[in-house]
């Protein structure tokens, strides 16, 4: 089985002794699923491969920057680290490939630290595990690389927020109440029901790009070439660390604290690692807003309450596309530059893209609104009001719905979410009480 060690030196490389096999491996990498979503990383790998074979002496950071990233000749590499960041991400993708779809390769390729020439070597045989380690060794490496369990999110939250494990259950936003055990049927319908389930975190780099550009890059651009989507907002390159947010980790921790039995097998996945096919076959939880969670754009068209952002005023609103008597046409949050004020949250349950499972959306006009949406589904009184309003008795599959909520900001928290408006959608064909249909 292939191993992703990064301790080889350039002198160990097999590319001169086995050029055909090494070039064939590079071609498989370029055509792999692992690199399928990043044209820029494929371009970088192709350039490094050709230079390793043809001109290794000329393989310098400035040359890569000019050839791959379009930097002008003589640019200052001390001030512009785009090549180093790109190579860092490529290293991670190479390791992911050899842990997953390329785990049976007889050769591996690495980029040693501080170098840009590729090193090809024989795949190291896997050491036999000790008896005490057999159970952990049985877990597939690919499952560990992209399928973090929610427990990993809890640990990450503890490390990120600097709090103890006991305090982490409170998640700095108030702990879920004990009555959540009464809602196990609802949660099983949302993330259970025999389908795989995943929690998709926000992408903090995408949010930064959208803020800098004063417009949100398209989902199509993000899905096909995330680096290009970031560049639209002036981002200098991909981050070498998972691009998530503290808010996503806080919400993940809160959910597992509320329903540990249900959420123990839910995967925590970074937005940038999501594949469209997963949204067709999995149960999914999406958090944030379309400015930080671009995959929400796939479901916005079916929602009555649609998120909009005005970058000039720095105000976000939920647009009510079909107001009912007594409802407003829009619900605008207080500007993100102001202290206090009101925020709005949307809790929505929709079918996934393949209609084989569900998507739970926790969205807010500001981060406080998204946090309040998580509070709504982990607070028995609020969740009871939502489920009563959509006519869910707790038995069987929950109907698809939207619930708009309002909260007031008080210091670093919010008042309990208040239900403002609700829509019930057809969960199954013939649902006569549906106000709108997905």
Image: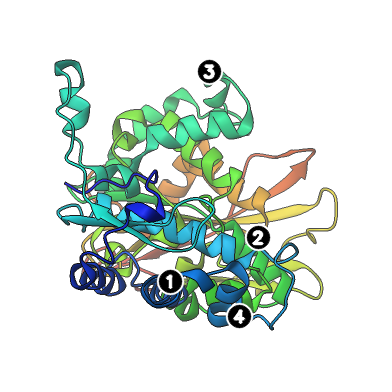
Discs 2/3, front: 3
The residue that label 3 is drawn on is: 166
Looking at the rendered structure, which numbered label has been put on residue 365? 2
Looking at the rendered structure, which numbered label has been put on residue 330? none
Discs 4/2, front: 4
Looking at the image, which is closer to me, 22 or 175?
A: 22
72 lies above or below 250: below
228 lies above or below 177: below
Looking at the image, which is closer to me, 12 or 166?
A: 12
What SS does tag 1 mark? helix
* Sequence order check, earlier mark of 2 and 1: 1
Looking at the rendered structure, which numbered label has been put on residue 66? 4
Q: CA distance from mark 1 to mark 4?
A: 13 Å
Looking at the rendered structure, which numbered label has been put on residue 48? 1
Looking at the image, which is closer to me, 340 or 47?
A: 47
User: Which residue corresponds to the image point at 29% horizontal and 49% vertical from the top-left?
Assistant: 197
Residues at badges 3 and 4 in contact (C-beta under 8 Å)?
A: no
Discs 2/1, front: 1
Q: CA distance from mark 3 to mark 4?
A: 51 Å
Residues at badges 2 and 1 in contact (C-beta under 8 Å)?
A: no
> Is 35 on the left or on the right of 210, as rendered?
left
Identity of the residue furthest to the right in this view: 338
């Amino acid at each position: 089985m292939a191993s992703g060690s990064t301790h080889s030196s350039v002198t160990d490389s097999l590319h001169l002794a086995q050029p055909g096999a090494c070039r064939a491996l590079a071609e498989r990498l370029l055509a792999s699923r692992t690199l399928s979503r990043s044209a820029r990383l494929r371009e970088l790998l192709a350039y490094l491969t050709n230079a390793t074979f043809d001109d290794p002496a000329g393989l310098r950071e400035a040359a890569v920057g000019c050839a791959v990233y379009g930097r002008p000749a003589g640019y200052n590499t001390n001030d512009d680290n785009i090549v180093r960041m790109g190579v860092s991400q490529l290293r991670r993708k190479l390791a992911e490939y050899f842990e997953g779809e390329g785990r049976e390769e007889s050769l591996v390729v690495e980029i040693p630290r501080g170098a840009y020439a590729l090193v090809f070597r024989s795949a190291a045989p896997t050491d036999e595990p000790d008896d005490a380690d057999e159970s952990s060794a049985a877990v597939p490496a690919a499952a560990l690389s992209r399928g973090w369990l929610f427990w990993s999110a809890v640990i990450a939250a503890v490390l990120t927020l600097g709090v103890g494990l006991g305090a982490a259950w409170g998640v700095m936003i108030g702990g879920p109440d004990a009555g959540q055990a009464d809602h196990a049927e609802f949660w099983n319908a949302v993330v259970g029901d025999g389908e795989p389930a995943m929690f998709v975190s926000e992408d903090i780099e995408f949010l930064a790009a959208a803020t800098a550009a004063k417009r949100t890059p398209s989902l199509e651009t993000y899905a096909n070439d995330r680096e290009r989507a970031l560049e639209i907002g002036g981002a200098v390159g991909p981050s070498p660390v998972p691009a998530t947010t503290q808010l996503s980790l806080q919400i993940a921790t809160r959910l597992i604290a509320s329903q540990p039995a249900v959420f123990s097998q839910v995967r925590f996945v970074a937005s940038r690692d999501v594949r469209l096919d997963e949204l067709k076959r999995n149960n999914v939880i999406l958090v944030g807003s379309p400015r930080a969670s671009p995959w929400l754009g796939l479901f916005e068209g079916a929602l009555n309450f649609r998120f909009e952002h005005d970058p000039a005023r720095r105000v976000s609103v939920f647009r009510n596309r079909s107001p009912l008597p007594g409802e407003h046409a829009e619900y605008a949050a207080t500007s993100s530059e102001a202290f206090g004020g009101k925020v709005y949250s949307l809790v929505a349950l929709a079918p996934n893209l393949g209609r084989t499972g569900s998507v739970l959306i926790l969205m807010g006009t500001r981060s406080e609104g998204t946090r309040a949406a998580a509070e709504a589904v982990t607070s028995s009184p609020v969740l009871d009001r939502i489920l009563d309003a959509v006519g869910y008795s707790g038995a069987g599959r929950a109907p698809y719905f939207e619930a708009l909520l309002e909260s007031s900001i008080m210091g670093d928290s919010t008042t309990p979410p208040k239900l403002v408006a609700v829509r019930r959608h057809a969960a199954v064909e013939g649902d006569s009480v549906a106000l709108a249909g997905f």
